C-alpha cells in the first residue's frame, strides 16, 4: 500500500500535516558507519569496548567452573595470601586467596552497569530539561536554566562523599541515581541550544499552525533531532561515572559487597600491597584507564559522524 499523497510544493501530506526531516542518522546507518570507520582512533576505541563487553559477559563463567573462582566469597583452599600468577590463577590471588582474574571480569560488568546507567539517567534528564526550556522559553527557560546553573557548580565528588559519610556506604544503584542527578546540567544547556534552533524550523512552525500539541511537537519533531547529540554526550558521561565510582571505592566509600576495579585498588592499598604486588595493582588500574579512554575515543569519532561541519570535512577528504 502506498503512503499518503504528498504535495511537494508545500511539504504537506494528504492529512494536511507538514513533513519534517526524519531521523536521517538512522536512515543512513551505512554511510554513518563508513564515516566512523575512517577514524582509526574511533575503531580502536570500539575494539576496546567490545573487549570489555566480552569481559563483562565472561564474568559469569568462572564461578560456574569452580566455586573458588567466585570474585567475593571464593577462596582457594591451598592459598590464603596474595600470590603471583599460577596455572590455576592466571593473574594471581589477592590477600585472601581470591582469584584476581574473576574480580577483574566482574569489575568490567560493574563498570558497564554503573557507567551506562548513570550516563543514561543524566542524559535523559538533561535532554528533557533542555527541550522543555528551549521550547517554552520565558519563565520556564529561566527557572530551569538557573536550576541547571546551581547543579553545574556543585562539586560532584564532594557532594557524593558528604552523602556517603552521612548515610553510610552507597550501594551501586544509590550511586547511579546520585551521579545521574548531578551530571545532567551540562547536557541540558547543549540540548536547549539545539532546541532553540529547531523550534523555528518551518516544519515545527507548520505543526503549530496545524494545531499539534506541545507534547506532540516535542516528541515527534524536536526529540528525534536532538537524540544524536544526547547519545554523543552519553558516551562522555559513561567515562565520568566510571571514574567517580573508582575514586569513591578507592577512598573507601564504595559498596563493600560489590567487586569493582576501584574496590580492588582499595583492597591493595588497605593491605599494604600497593608497591609489593604489581600483578594485583596493574590489572584494575589499566582497565580503568582503557575503558575510560575507549568511551572517549568512541565519543570523538561519533562527533565526526553527527556534527555536520566535521562530517563534511571527513567526506571531502
Image: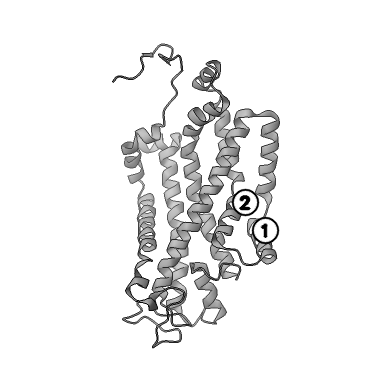
Instruction: Give the residue displayed 62% in from the left and 67% down from the top.
Output: 169
On the image, the x and y values in percent for residue 282 come to 45, 72
Image-based side of 236 in relation to 140, left or right? left
Q: State which quarter of the image contains the C terminus.
A: top left
Q: Secondary structure at mark 2?
A: helix
On the image, the x and y values in percent for residue 313 come to 40, 36
Image-based side of 39 in relation to 213, left or right? left
Residue 125 appears anywhere in the view: yes
Residue 38 appears anywhere in the view: no
Residue 195 sits above or below residue 238 on the image: above
For residue 159, which numbered disc appears in the image? 1
Q: Secondary structure at mark 1?
A: helix
Residue 47 sits above or below residue 66 on the image: above
On the image, the x and y values in percent for residue 315 come to 35, 36
Determine whether label 1 and label 2 are within 8 Å by CB: yes
Q: Reading the chain from its start, which is encountered first: label 1 or label 2?
A: 1
Q: Farthest residue toward the left? A: 1
Residue topped by disc 2? 182
Instruction: Give the residue displayed 42% in from the left and 41% down from the top.
Output: 304
Q: Nearer the viewer, residue 186 or 166?
A: 166
Instruction: Give the residue displayed 33% in from the left and 20% down from the top.
Output: 3
On the image, the x and y values in percent for residue 126 come to 58, 42
Q: State which quarter of the image contains the N terminus.
A: top left
Q: Nearer the viewer, residue 185 or 168?
A: 168
Q: Nearer the viewer, residue 12 or 281?
A: 12
Q: Residues within 10 Å of mark 2 (few under 14, many from 20)?
A: many
Q: Which of the 4 image quadrants contains residue 103?
A: bottom left
For residue 244, which numbered disc appears in the image? none
Mark 1 and mark 2: Cα distance apart in space? 9 Å
Amino acid at each position: 500500500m502506498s503512503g499518503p499523497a504528498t504535495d511537494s510544493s508545500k511539504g504537506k501530506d494528504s492529512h494536511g500535516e507538514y513533513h519534517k526531516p526524519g531521523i536521517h542518522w538512522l536512515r543512513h546507518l551505512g554511510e554513518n558507519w563508513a564515516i566512523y570507520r575512517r577514524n582509526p582512533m574511533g575503531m580502536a576505541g570500539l575494539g576496546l569496548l567490545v573487549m570489555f563487553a566480552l569481559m563483562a559477559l565472561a564474568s559469569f563463567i568462572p564461578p560456574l567452573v569452580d566455586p573458588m573462582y567466585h570474585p567475593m566469597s571464593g577462596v582457594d583452599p591451598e592459598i590464603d595470601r596474595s600470590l603471583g600468577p599460577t596455572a590455576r590463577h592466571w593473574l594471581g590471588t589477592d590477600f585472601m586467596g581470591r582469584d584476581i582474574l574473576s574480580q577483574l571480569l566482574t569489575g568490567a560488568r560493574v563498570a558497564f552497569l554503573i557507567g551506562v546507567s548513570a550516563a543514561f539517567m543524566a542524559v535523559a534528564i538533561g535532554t528533557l530539561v533542555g527541550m522543555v526550556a528551549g521550547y517554552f522559553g520565558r519563565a520556564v527557560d529561566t527557572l530551569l536554566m538557573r536550576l541547571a546553573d546551581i547543579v553545574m557548580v556543585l562539586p560532584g565528588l564532594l557532594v557524593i562523599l558528604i552523602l556517603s559519610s552521612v548515610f553510610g556506604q552507597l550501594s551501586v544503584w544509590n550511586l547511579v541515581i546520585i551521579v545521574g542527578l548531578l551530571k545532567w546540567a551540562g547536557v541540558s544547556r547543549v540540548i536547549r541550544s539545539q532546541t532553540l534552533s529547531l523550534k523555528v524550523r518551518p516544519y515545527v512552525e507548520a505543526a503549530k499552525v496545524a494545531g499539534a500539541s506541545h507534547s506532540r511537537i516535542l516528541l515527534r519533531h524536536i526529540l528525534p533531532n536532538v537524540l544524536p547529540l544526547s547519545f554523543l554526550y552519553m558516551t562522555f558521561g559513561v567515562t565520568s561515572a566510571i571514574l567517580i565510582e573508582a575514586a569513591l571505592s578507592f577512598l573507601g566509600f564504595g559498596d563493600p559487597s560489590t567487586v569493582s576495579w576501584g574496590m580492588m585498588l582499595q583492597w591493595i592499598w588497605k593491605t599494604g600491597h600497593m608497591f609489593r604486588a604489581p600483578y594485583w595493582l596493574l590489572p584494575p588500574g589499566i582497565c580503568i584507564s582503557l575503558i575510560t579512554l575507549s568511551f572517549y575515543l568512541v565519543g570523538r569519532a561519533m562527533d565526526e559522524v553527527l556534527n555536520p561541519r566535521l562530517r563534511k570535512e571527513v567526506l571531502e577528504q
